[in-house]
Image (cartoon, helix red, strand yellow):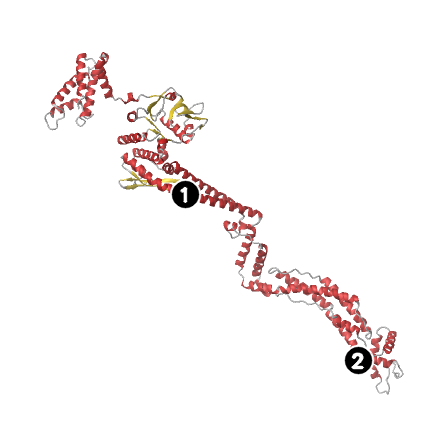
Amino acid sequence: MTIERISLLRNVGQFDNVSSGAQLPLTPFSVIYAENGRGKTTLSAILKSLSSGDPSLIQNRKRLKAQHEPHVIIQFSGASAIFQNGAWSATQPEIHVFDDAFVAENVCSGIEIETSHRQNLHELILGAKGVALSKALQGHVERIEQHNKDLRAKQDAIPAAARGPFSVDAFCGLSPKKDIDQEIEEAERRLAAAKAAGAIHQRTAFQSLNLPGFDLDRIRAVLARSLPELEAAAAALVREHLRKLGRDGENWVAEGMPRIEAASAGLDHKACPFCAQDLAGSNLIPHYQAYFSDAYSQLKADIRTLGRGIAADHGGEVMAGFERSIRDVSETRDFWKAFTPIPDIHVDTAAVVRAWTAARESVLEILRAKAVSPLEPMKLPDQAVEAVAAFDEQRRSVAEAFDKFLACNEAIKTVKEQAASADVSALEGDLVRLKSIKARFEPDVAAKCDDYLKEKAEKARTEAARTKAREALDRYRETIFPAYEVAINAYLAKFNAGFRLGSVTSVNNRGGSAANYHVVINNENVPLTADAGPSFRTTLSAGDRNTLALAFFFSSLEQAGNLADKILVIDDPMTSLDEHRSLTTMEVMRELYDKVRQIIVLSHSKPFLCDLWASADKNGRSSARIARSNPGSTILAWDVSADAVTEHDRRHKLVRDYLHTADHTKEREVAAALRHILESYMRVACPAHCPPERLLGNFLLECERKLGAQDEILSEANVRELKQLLGYANRFHHDTNPAWQTVLINDAELVGYAQRTLKFCSRT
């Protein structure tokens, strides 16, 4: 697809409303001439916008005071591209434009090279494929930077207090612990023990506590005892009598019996200790003696001993001691539970004391009854048995509780040992870490950690993609950059640049990839920038910089490949170029003409465009010019052939036409042209002897002096002919004849000298 016509240019640059271009075809090789300021740069910018799709290239050139927005129509073969309302209907990326903007973007701004130039040059070297690889890499880099921002935000959302000693990554990577609460509790106890090591060392462990029980078998045995050798009738008689005596009668009689001996001292009979009467006639005394025998006394003593023992073992002081023991064990538990698990104490001391008191009173009550009637066998009442059973249940409960406490003494021993050698700082660290592990899996924190880990995983995937993209780009660079260096130096050699480029490489930085190189002059490396000494800005002239830009442009086209599909737009390539580089530039464009789809060259130099035109295929070339219009500029047809004719050519044609047509109105003009024809011819025929600054008469004198010499310039015949022709021609030349305009002209004479002049200037 080629650009066939510029159908409309409206409200852009110098173009107000130009549609004349629709009548002017653009062929595979097109030249457009324009004076500076007429609109070449605008047209180049339009075509560059069509290539890139960048609307600013056109919108920034909106015509001043225009009421409407820019409107452009470019006709292609079979299609059209329309720029309207700030956008193109279609783009043509195969258009490549060389202009001042290309130099400013890819080489330097003025004489300075900036980072942006090297970045743009990097893309230029890479071409479409490499740029795609580079953009893919840069896209991954930018996404990683966004990942980093998101990670910082998500990291900050995780409470620092919850993390404890862990970094965010370590914190989020923690594994849950099933029994974390128990571990925290244990750690807290170990830490508390370490801090209270002195008190722990002095504190005792649990002491045993055993409540006394009731020996029911012994009680029952004592209650059941009597005196079997005492006859039942006698015993009944004694008991009957004792009942008559009333309360404590038995004790009173029992205490009196031992006194009989004392009362009978010196008597021949047993005397009553109370009334001193003879007891021989008493039928009770023998029974009393049997009743209150040693066995009887022992029985009573056993009853008293049992009762006193029970009263002592189950008395108020013992109960009070029990309650104190319960308070002590409670205090001991309260102390140790901070350092090791201690079971709760569940002892209802009031209930124990009530049951205990009830059992004791029930037993003592029956024993007191037995003591009153020692010889009377008795049974332990059911009420007393139940009371003792209830107390035994309380005893078992107390015993079980104390067994649990005593079982903790081994753990308490361990606590003492650990506290004695504990490292408080280490234990504090352990506790903080455990609390952090617990905090990590609290719902709110866990959600934040999951977000962070998800973002981190996304970043890792992007980093992997970045690595692959960088490897692909590096592999491509390893091929393209050395080839580009060879290509550009080949073009610089063609241009006789006097310098070349060295170490054309790619470098990576945060802002993206950039091309790096240095200029080599006389085999010396010249840096792109330097605070002092030689550098790009001090060693390259304006022509050198433009030459370098052309070399960059042509090399990039060569390396990009697919030349057959490309449309080249070249705007004023001759700016600042020396003559020999201008010729080389034309040669390069002639070579490209056979390789690309279309070339459009814009310039303010007619000779340059005429030379290009002359060398192009006559069947594939076209021309146009941008000319002044009212208002602004317009596009017109351009007769290149007419502008390509030199003054010498025109004068030569003028004389030939006069001889052929005999147009007498041209006689004086023809006569005046003869001297100029002779001068132009001798300038070419004898350039060493007839340079531009030398008068033709002086040249003729030199030719006469050297006739016959080894360095003869012209033959004698030629000198004579030139002298005669010049003599005629000087009559009509303002430098040799001030009245040349009034000299009479003879037609026959003029025809003769005209014929002779053309013949002389045709000699080889």
- The answer to whether residue 308 is left or right of residue 605 is right
Which residue ends up furthest to the right in the rendered image? 281
Up/down of 418 relative to 247, above or below: above
What residue is pinned by disc 1? Answer: 470
Task: Report if residue 674 is visible in the image.
Answer: yes
- Quarter assignment of residue 315: bottom right
Task: Report if residue 34 is visible in the image.
Answer: no
Determine crowd level at label 1: few under 14, some 14-19, many 20+ residues with C-alpha closer than 10 A: some
Which of pointers 2 and 1 lies earlier in the amino acid sequence? 2
- The answer to whether residue 686 is left or right of residue 73 is left
Q: Provide the secondary structure element on which disc 1 rests.
A: helix
Which of the pair 523/2 is nearer the observer? 2
What residue is pinned by disc 2? Answer: 294
Up/down of 716 relative to 417, above or below: above
Image quadrant holding the N terminus, namely: top left
Which residue corresponds to the image point at 20% horizontal and 20% vertical from the top-left?
677
